[in-house]
């Protein structure tokens, strides 16, 4: 199948009815209209075979995830997603693969009202690069900087589950015992978290104008909270007891492993935000009203670095310390 036919296939599957798409797939570039009073928020993320996903991942899941990781970035900015572009690099022009990939991509895009407005199709090692565009009322975007000492640290979404799913898949069938512990539905839910992340869009929009800072957690809580603290020129004090430990994780991993996955496991795509004391109750009520899983895990402090305190107030040393920004 020629590049042209693949594009025609994508075009046909990706039909959309957003009135702000003046020109979509088919010309040299897309033309999009940004409504009066809105700011355009854009991000790009690339998934590369052998680096960002296991070889056995299905085309459908790859399509979903390549968009989901971008929508997570938009969620962290408080933006409503609008449009996306898809750069596909394929070793062969495999129509069945592209069809499944696009179906996964569009399942999420259509649910969230995102129009696929263009892209690029080239030959090479398997990789997917998605550029997403979102809209936010002028001046209301959420940023990493802005956290102040005393603010509460909230996480919206689950932590450690995707990394738990990955650990389970990687241990699969090796006789280590991991593959037999816990029930099949529990293990399947963890794997689902890895392959089909749910971007926290409703949470991000609800936090707009109220959270003092926000970031999405893609590299693990400690690492990404570290980035937020660096940008805000503050530190964080987490309570070990307050960290979420899901039943699905606890059924498969021991207590120490669970804490490690929650603190340093990647691919969560949860949101970590800071909320001033005065707004906390209102924000929590609204999140609860939308049935958004929320965990209060600690406070912002003026001393730099992220520390974790156990029940008796002693510093807990995590197994993995996270990346460079962690102990700034
Ligand atoms: P050009 O050679 O001018 O860059 P292309 O032949 O690459 O044009 O693309 C033709 C049209 O198809 C453009 O509108 C482009 O955005 C769209 N397109 C190409 N590849 C993809 C893709 N993978 N997904 C969505 N749209 C695509
Ligand atoms: Mg091109």
Image (tube, rainbow, N blue to C red):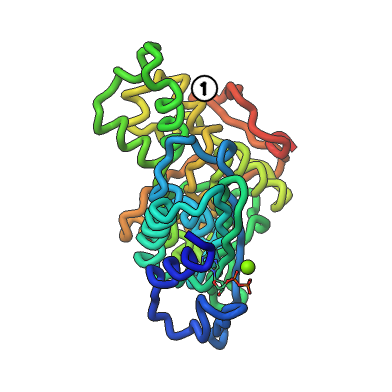
Residue 291: where, in percent of width, then height?
31, 55
Residue under the image location 53 percent in, 37 percent down:
266
Q: On the image, numbered disc 1 is attached to which residue? A: 312
Residue 68: where, in percent of width, then height?
46, 54
Q: Which of 262 and 59 is in front in this view?
A: 59
Is residue 80 positioned above or below 18 on the image? above
Query: Which residue sits furthest front?
Result: 1
Q: Nearer the viewer, residue 81 or 245?
A: 81
Tell whether 95 sits left or right of 305: left
Residue under the image location 48 percent in, 57 percent down:
67
Q: Which of 271 and 128 is in front in this view?
A: 128
Tell whether 154 sits left or right of 226: left
Is residue 95 positioned above or below 134 on the image? above
The quadrant of the picture showing ligand 1 is bottom right
Residue 271 seen anywhere in this rendered image of the structure: yes
Where does the C terminus fall, quadrant-wise?
top right
Q: How crowded is mark 1: few (under 14 residues within 10 Å), some or many (20 or more)?
A: few
């Amino acid at each position: 199948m020629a590049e042209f036919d693949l594009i025609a296939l994508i075009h046909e599957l990706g039909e959309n009815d957003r009135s702000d798409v003046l020109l979509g797939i088919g010309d040299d570039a897309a033309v999009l209209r940004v409504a009066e009073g809105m700011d355009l928020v854009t991000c790009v993320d690339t998934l590369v075979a052998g680096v960002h996903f296991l070889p056995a991942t299905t085309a459908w899941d790859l399509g979903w995830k390549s968009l989901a990781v971008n929508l997570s970035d938009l969620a962290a900015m408080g933006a409503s997603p609008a449009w996306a572009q898809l750069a596909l690099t394929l070793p062969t022009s495999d129509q069945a693969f592209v069809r499944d990939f696009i179906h996964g991509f569009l399942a999420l895009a259509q649910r969230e009202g995102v129009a696929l407005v263009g892209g690029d199709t080239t030959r090479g090692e398997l990789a997917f690069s998605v550029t997403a565009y979102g809209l936010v009322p002028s001046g209301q975007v959420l940023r990493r900087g802005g956290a102040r000492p005393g603010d509460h640290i909230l996480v919206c979404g689950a932590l450690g589950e995707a990394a738990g799913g990955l650990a389970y898949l990687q241990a699969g069938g090796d006789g280590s015992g991991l593959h037999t512990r816990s029930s099949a539905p529990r293990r399947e839910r963890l794997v689902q978290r890895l392959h089909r992340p749910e971007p926290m869009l409703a949470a991000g929009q609800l936090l707009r104008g109220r959270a003092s800072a926000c970031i999405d957690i893609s590299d693990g809580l400690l690492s990404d909270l570290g980035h937020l603290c660096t940008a805000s020129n503050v530190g964080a004090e987490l309570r070990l007891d307050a960290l979420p430990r899901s039943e699905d994780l606890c059924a498969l991993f021991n207590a120490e492993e669970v804490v490690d996955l929650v603190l340093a496991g990647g691919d969560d795509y949860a949101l970590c935000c800071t909320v001033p004391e005065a707004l906390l109750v209102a924000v929590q009520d609204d999140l609860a009203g939308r049935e958004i899983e929320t965990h209060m895990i600690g406070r912002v402090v003026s001393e730099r670095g992220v520390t974790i305190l156990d029940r008796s107030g002693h510093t807990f040393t995590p197994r993995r310390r996270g990346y460079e920004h962690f102990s700034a």
